[in-house]
Amino acid sequence: MEPYALLVAATLNAGTVLALAALGLLINEKAGIVNLGAEGMMLCAAIAGFATVVHTGSDLLGFAAGMAAGALLAGIFGLLVIGLGTNQYATGLAISLFGVGFSAFAGISYVQEKLPARPHFEIPFLSDIPWLGPALFKQHPLVYGVVAFVLALMWFLYRTRTGLVLRSVGESPESAHALGYSVRRIRFVAVLVGGALCGLSGAYISVVYTPLWVEGMVAGKGWIALALTTFATWRPARILLGAYLFGGVTMLQFHLQGLGVQVSSQLLTALPYVATIVVLALISRNPAWIRINMPASLGKPFHPSS
Amino acid sequence: MLQLERRPQASGFWRYASPVLALLLTVLIGIGLFVILGKDPLRGLQMFFWEPLKSAYALGELMVKATPLLVIALGLAVCYRSNVWNIGAEGQFVIGAVAAGGVALLADKETGRWIVVAVVLAGVAGGMAWASITAWLKDRFHANEILVSLMLVYVADMVLSYLVYGPWKDPAGYNFPQSKTFEAATQIPRLMSGSRVSVGLLIALAGVALAWVFLFRTRAGFAQQVGGLAPAAARYAGFSSRKALWVALLTSGGAAGLAGALEVAGPLGQLTPYVPAGYGFAAIIVAYVGRLHPVGMVFSAILMSMFYIGGELAQSRMGLPKSITGVFQGLLLFSLLACDTLVAYRLRWRSRRM
Amino acid sequence: MTDLTKRSVLKIAAISVVAAATLVACGKKEEAPKAAAKAEPLKVAFAYVGPVGDGGWTFAHDNARKAVEKQFGDKIVTSFVEKVPESADAERVFRDMAAQGNKLIFGTTFGYMEPMLKVAADSKDIKFEHATGYKTAENLRTYDSRTYEGAYMAGVIAGKMTKTNTLGVVASIPIPEVIRNINTFTLGAQSVNPKVKTKVVWVNEWFNPPKETEAATALINGGADVLMQNTDSPAVLQTAEKMGKRAFGWDSDMTAYGPKAHLGSAVINWTPYYIKAVGEALEGKWATGQSWWGVKEGAIDMVSVAADVPEDAKKKVDEIKAGLKDGSFVIWKGPIVGSDGKEILAKDAVADDKFLGGIKFYVKGVEGKVPN
């Protein structure tokens, strides 16, 4: 039974990466902004985090650096999209492209670097429980952190006034504006926070998940996170579950190989994407459903008329 | 402090000046980057702006790189002008290449040159078929075309991977994941010897003319764009937005598939897992920087190709890192997006005291 | 902005563009040819598929390039282009290398085969060296290293160190070379521990650290406690370090990436071959052919063996090295049985290079089927 415990543990780990980024994108999208630049933000954060840990030895500073890098790129995105009204999709793509290139550029001297010995995390008594222990309780604190964050985010979005304002900005910026809220400022903050979360995910990849730096190491997870947000119909809890699902699929593919089961690796790799398309089709089918789920102003620019 | 003030009408001057200014800004930042890296900035600029142009061979290589970008961008321009956001041209490119490759693999030593036409048509059909998935899902299920087309890119990569690792793997290829090298008969004809430029260039230029006529001189083209710019008005005028959707996606899918066929039956000559080269995404930038205008995109395709080739040369001749190409391309798009604001807004210096 | 200001901006913009163009044109002139007082150094160029910092495959090639520079001093001038994709772009890179006056060009991955052949056909006065390929020409020859010898020695160590009798291999792409390495690793382990089994996970890429990490995790989940890889990054070793298992470095010495987990590194040393190739080119003795070098020629080695490996295993590895050097030891010698139970090599039969080059089967002890 032990091997499956380790599979669960690995899935939680992989899912955390996706969940952090997807939650960041969710905050963006709840405010009505689509940021296609996740991949670029995550990569820049990965190198920022890695380099910081190399120089300071502190994981915490590494995470902070990653969040700052993500927020910085998101800030540029926000200035262009919200401040100057540029097209969200093109700007997001530019961030992605730029981020991929810039991170490779900045990371050149770090490719051979190693981090100081990675700490092992264990919750004192719980980790000794047979099976459950290795499965659930030997994880990096962020794995538990993201679960806590999801709960906090759900409370924030659906039970606080600020959350309501955020959601209304995403649903109907005109109404929010008419009520006196600064749509642009709220969106900008949402973009920054979202960027910081994507940054945290990126730093997690290079500091915890695969503690080294190679260019392009995010390897498409930014795009998966984007898909995940839609797949989860813009609900935080579903994002977490979906992240574990998507993360688990890759692990499953390798695990099946280890067991001698011959499944086409391409089929398994394509599965998350096909699943996202199917879900998208299903939830969009009914315009009423879409209205309930998707923030109505998603992707549309807002120009305050004054 | 600086403020943005909306212009009463879009500035004609800045419509043309904005890309130039964006390029200038990119060049300036580029010079700064070269200096920071301790490299000679003039030589760096030379790599990007002179070397790719300086000989007939270099120009040929430039065309080889620019052709697929231009072809895909033409399709994307029709698409974006119709307000259909096809982000998945890369996937349509791959499936077009797969379809074209499939037909090419059917050829043997005796096959006549007509197979080239079949290969190209197969590419177009493949791209169209892949794009039609996105179109159908949007038409029938209102599914967001950005996400669907993007997801389909990864699925397309997996289809290619499955084929070159499996049924289409070259039996004499030592188990490497690649198809047989295509017979000479399937090769897209070259325009002249000594250069890799193919008739694809002529097809691309014909496409430019066709796109221009369609968009700016036909009723259908007009209807297509109105459907995108003002759906309500379009409906009132009797233009079908549904038709516009399908035309947009089939056009851009077919164009991307065509580019895929030209690549695979041209410079590549076989199917490998490396067929997806990012052209589908780069073409989005080409379309944008070219202002979604067929003639403008000719220039932006050439510019992007100069960045690609210049980046390669900068790496091999000056020891600059390869990633600098991506940095420049991203910077160009950023600058353009920022400079474009000047089309609709003007900068004003407002004194606080007023 | 007033009309006056607009016009000024336009003027400034136009002048800048003209100025930049002029500067560029002027800058071009600095490329005046340097007349050398002594013989022109031989220009040697290298095309790498990965980044020089990958710590694995490309890193090993670049180390050899630097060694060659040191060896030949100012008789040669080397340059390299990294991350050249195995696609249509490769041809342009090789042509540019040819146009830049390089007379000896190395292409370090299989996927450069067709582009190099094309360029070689057009540049008969330039010599091309293609790593791991199988097509040659008058001015293009292939070279490769017997990585399976390193895999065998790793297997011997692994067989002694495993406690679960299950080994794991993170494999890249199912080409004969990789399958051969998996088999040889298993044979080596079985020579000291007949009960050993090997599990394999294919990532279908040469270089993808996150995927390699996940594959390594899956293998450990499946019970493997000693890992080997045929991929290009240190991710597998790092995963072993994280999970308290053991692993080997591959292509280059990877000790630093996992000091506690590291058992040894099966390294490729391209220096001896590169020195030979450059020397032949300098002396005009270069001729086409196919080279496959191993421990005997100094191209393969097992280095940095961990201190806690038992003495008898270390001794056996040294014996193997000596035996390979003087030809007294052959790895692929019968009896060898396939995973389907059928005999592949009869007792005392020796496999030749052709046989080794076409391996598409698993030996007994390797679990699963070879992906087709």
Image: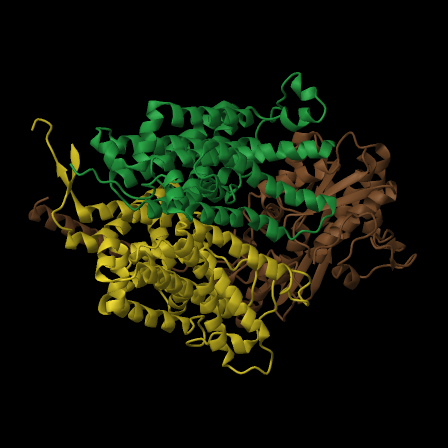
Chain colours: A green, B yellow, C brown
Is C163 displayed left or right of B45 in the figure?
right
- The residue under the point 68% across, 39% down is C218
- The residue under the point 25% across, 58% down is B235
User: As rendered, which of B98 and C361 lies closer to the eye?
Assistant: B98
Image position, residue C187 (x, y; %): 83, 48
Image position, residue C350 (x, y; %): 86, 59
Q: Is residue A169 visible?
A: yes
User: As rendered, which of B58 and C100 lies closer to the eye?
Assistant: B58
Picture quarter containing residue C255?
top right
Picture quarter containing residue A210?
top right
Exactly how many numbered labels are in the figure? 0
Picture quarter containing residue B192?
bottom left
- The residue under the point 61% across, 23% down is A121
User: In the image, is residue B195 above or below residue C202?
Assistant: below
Q: Quadrant of the N terminus of chain C?
A: top left
Q: Quadrant of the C terminus of chain C?
A: bottom right
Is C15 displayed left or right of A292 in the figure?
left
Is C314 displayed left or right of A87 in the figure?
right
Image position, residue A67 (x, y; %): 43, 30
- The residue under the point 45% across, 24% down is A152
